[in-house]
Image (cartoon, rainbow, N blue to C red):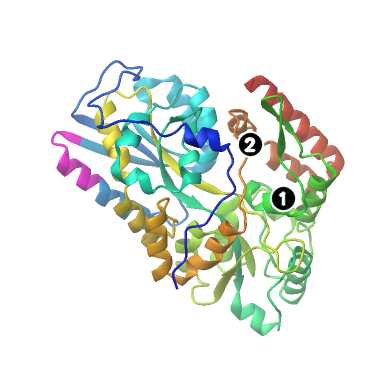
Amino acid sequence: MKLSAPRIRAARTAAALAALVVATACAPQASDNSSSGKDEKSGTLRVWLFQEVGNKPKEKVVDAAVAAFEKAHEGARVHVEYIPVETRAQRIKAAFNDPKSAPDVIEYGNTDTAGYVKDGGLADVSREFAAWDEAKDTDPTARQSVTVDGKVYGAPYFVGVRALYYRTDIFKELDLTVPKTQAELAATAGKIHAAKPDLYGLAVGGAYTYGAMPFIWANGGELARGKGGSYASAIDSAEARKGIKAYTSLFGDTNCPAAKCAGMGGNDTVTVFASGKAAMAIGGDFSHAAVEAGTVKGKYAVVPLPGVKAGSVAPAFAGGNNLGVLKSTTHRTIAVDLMEELASKKTQSELFDAMGFLPTYTDVREQVADREPFVAPFVKTLASGARFVPASPAWAQIDASLVLPTMFQEIVSGKKDVAKASEDAAKKMNDAFSSAG
């Protein structure tokens, strides 16, 4: 079965995408936008990549790409460090402020692009990207994720969405059907936990922002709305509050006790599911390798996360990661070469095989979908209309300040009700939008 590349709802305007096209016949040998003023062609390049759940397969693919790069660049060496996703904001912000200890190339979440550009940390690689032959096959939405005001600040690394993982053996044992609505999802989670108190029905996390967003969107809510060239928070709207209530109702003694689940993030919920301690979890296509390496191997399946109405799919966050070159690098030209090697079609195809990361190239994604059936529910989710966060530099601040996790945790701990917690979160978001301009 051949699956066409999904269409994701654009997070930025078509005009911004059109501005990406740069008429350049050949790649420059160097660029003048490096703040270091140097462009050394040898020496050691430092790379920061994200530490994944079950990171060894990723390391193997990266090592192969690094070996190919070093073979093609005499005198160049690469040192790769894997950093925790949860502390990326602090680490990368510090690197922007201290060029001497900063890496040359970083992996970063696509929600961080606008903020990192505003901070002046990422190099403009528009000319090199336009001249890079493989870039022409990049998914348009992935391309948008590295684009700010028509300029390109990196290379898309992978795209990702989340869907519902569930234990086929548990469902068979308890004679349960796969939930078709979010109400059925909550009811099914309760039935499982009641029958098997040692299992979470659905593993949820108070710090799992991107697992909670589909509940907000499925109920008609928004994170923010455009206002006067900027954004205004919509997290305290009636529709958003309905979605927040739906998500936070999953915490408690009937499913996932707040004392244990309020602090969990996305990786935690995947780990809980993979280790056999939960019957369901919201996980990404990028979680596949970790689940396969767990005790539930051969005993699970994946379907799109249901929406409010039967047969609907909850809008998922159009996630993914990018690679970028720091503006402070003293190895501008070869750092861009390394970025392209790590983000190449060959490397992305191998990362899919190793980790389940969906490639950002439409042709490569079609190829991997042909050979791996597990991709189908994630491609369907993308095709159903995925969503993105506000394309504002304020989002990095909102994310790093844990505005939404704090809101969820205040609710599930009983410190605040939905109305008060969402009102306070909206104020924090609006403060961030205002400061970002």
Measured as percent of width and height from the top left, residue 382 is found at 56, 57
| Residue 258 in sight | yes
Q: Which residue is mark 1?
A: 217
Measured as percent of width and height from the top left, residue 109 is found at 50, 41
Q: Which mark is residue 390?
A: 2
Q: Residue at x 68, y 58 (%)?
A: 314
Which secondary structure is most common in the magenta stretch? helix
- Dot 1: few (<14), some (14–19), or many (≥20) neighbours within 10 Å? many
Q: Which residues are magenta?
A: 66-76
Residue 60 within the magenta-colored segment of the rendering: no
Element marked by disc 2: loop
Amino acid type, residue under disc 2 in the picture? Pro
- Per the model, the C-alpha gap separating discs 2 and 1 is 13 Å
Quarter in which the C terminus is drawn? top right
Q: Above or below — where is 160 with respect to 303?
A: above
Amino acid type, residue under disc 1 in the picture? Trp
In this rendering, would 43 be left or right of 243?
Answer: left
Q: Above or below — where is 74 with respect to 65?
A: above
In this rendering, would 28 be left or right of 396?
Answer: left
Q: Residue at x 71, y 84 (%)?
A: 175
Q: Above or below — where is 21 with respect to 432?
A: below
Element marked by disc 1: helix
In this rendering, would 47 be left or right of 145?
Answer: left
Q: How many marks?
A: 2
Quarter in which the N terminus is drawn? bottom left
Q: Which mark is residue 140?
A: none
